[in-house]
Image (tube, grey):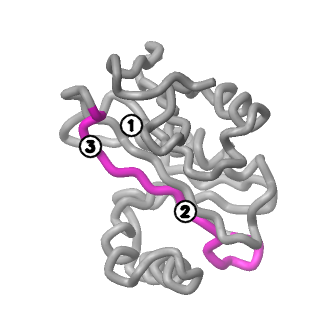
Amino acid sequence: MREGGPIDVEVAGFRLVEVLGRMTPEVRGEIVGMWTGEGVLAPAEAQRRAAEVVLAVRAADGTIAGVNTAYVQKAPGTALDYWFYRMFLRPAHRGNWALPRAMFVHAIEVLRRHPHPSRPRGLVAIIENPRLMRKAAAATIGELGATRIGRDAQGRDVWCVNFDGTVPVAPPGLLRPAD
């Protein structure tokens, strides 16, 4: 990464490239093709969600190995805007903890400085993968600066990072306590 410039870093044999607000039509096509080819998104949703991509991850062969996305919405039970974070890695590229760690940390960096008009307060990640709710994975997420604020109605862990460094707290009654 250049000092003060967009993210472009090598991590564990992958290249993470910042694309939020600077995605070319070619990269957009590659990302949409990855999602539809893997069967995880319908074509219309893949096209819509492409505008939310923060970082594109390229494998050593140059193909798109994964992405992370974020969109702004009010945090439930509050009037505060937050970035809501998602991540997808192709199955062939899963299993290396260094990659999702780097994706998360660099996404926070990008989103913290992004000039969104509502100036989101931080980032929320709702963990859908049960393996990432295990103690070891939860400890790793905590080490990255996130705070587990509870579980949603579906039993998924909800993590939050406030960009100002304050410790996030869920509104009373919104989430169940995390075990």
The percent position of residue 61, horizontal first and vertical second, equals: 75, 79
Decide which of 69, 109 is in the foreground and name it. Answer: 69
Which of the two marks, 2 or 1, is nearer to us in this view? 2
Q: Earlier in the sequence, mark 2 or mark 1?
A: 2
Crowdedness near tag 1: few (<14), some (14–19) or many (≥20) residues, C-alpha within 10 Å: few
What residue sits 39% from the left and 31% below the top? 122
Query: Dots 2 and 1: beta carbons under 8 Å?
Result: no
* Residue linked to disc 3: 73
What amino acid is labelled 3 in the image?
A: Gln
Give the number of the mark in front: 2 or 3: 3
For the residue labelled by badge 3, is the local secondary structure a helix, a strand or a loop? strand
In magenta segment, residue 64: yes
Residue 67: image tag: 2
Alpha-carbon span between mark 2 and mark 3? 20 Å
Horizontal relation, residue 122 to residue 30: left or right: left
Residue denoted by label 1 = 113
Q: Main secondary structure of the magenta part?
A: strand
Magenta range:
59-76
Distance in Å between CA atoms under marks 2 and 1: 19 Å
* 75 in relation to 17, above or below: above
Q: Which is more N-terminal, label 3 or label 2? A: 2
**x, y percentage for residue 58?**
65, 69
| Identity of the residue drawn at 38% across and 80% down | 25
